[in-house]
Image (spheres, rainbow, N blue to C red):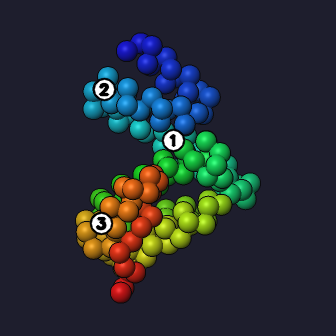
Amino acid sequence: MDELKEKIFKAQSEGDIASLYVLEAEAQETFDEDTLMAFYANILDLALERLTTALENFEKLDMNEVQDFATLRALYEYAIEHHSAGSTHDASALFEVLGGLSNDEAFGEAMKVHRAACDAKIDFETFIDEYVDMDSVQEGGKFYISYFKKDIGA
């Protein structure tokens, strides 16, 4: 466990979100729930720092850059948490920021659908059941929901 903690501390001190995600499976097997929650909170803190820097510098994050990819993943997971917890207003704002933050057109388009679901106050379970093509999402291999059965409001 000490070796894992050392690797995590090193990644955190270097702001290396991608390395933290590489250590995720080992962390899940090793840590108790409270420590695991702190692990994910650290990933989110680093992602929020990178978000702030990108916004301050008017930068887009590049899906092909490992740290940018990991940052977008962490922020997307955070937005999904808000949506699944019923905080559709906060989730909508996060999806809007994410859509404009990435240089990846497909990601941006998917964030528009997520945002539309939140703006329409569609709860997360209904969104998944009625609007998401989960088979295609699983086959697509992306970290975000990118395939939909129908448009929001259709």
Residue 29 circle label: 2
Residue 128 circle label: 3
Query: Residue drawn 44% across and 52% down?
Result: 141
Please tell me whether residue 152 is drawn above or below residue 110 in the rendered image: below
- At label 3, the amino acid type is Ile
Mark 3–mark 2 distance (CA, rounded to whole Å): 28 Å
Query: Residue drawn 34% across and 68% down?
Result: 132
Residue 139 percent coordinates (x, y) = 39, 56
Q: Quadrant of residue 154?
A: bottom left
Please tell me whether residue 136 is drawn above or below residue 41 in the rendered image: below
Residue under circle 1?
A: 45
Side of 126 relative to 45 (left or right): left
SS at badge 3: helix
1 or 2: tag closer to the N-terminus: 2
SS at badge 1: helix
Mark 1–mark 2 distance (CA, rounded to whole Å): 22 Å
- At label 2, the amino acid type is Glu
Residue 125 circle label: none
SS at badge 2: helix
Mark 3–mark 1 distance (CA, rounded to whole Å): 27 Å
- At label 1, the amino acid type is Asp
3 or 2: tag closer to the N-terminus: 2
Please tell me whether residue 42 is drawn above or below residue 151 in the rendered image: above
Query: Residue drawn 37% across and 15% down?
Result: 1
Q: Is residue 43 visible?
A: yes
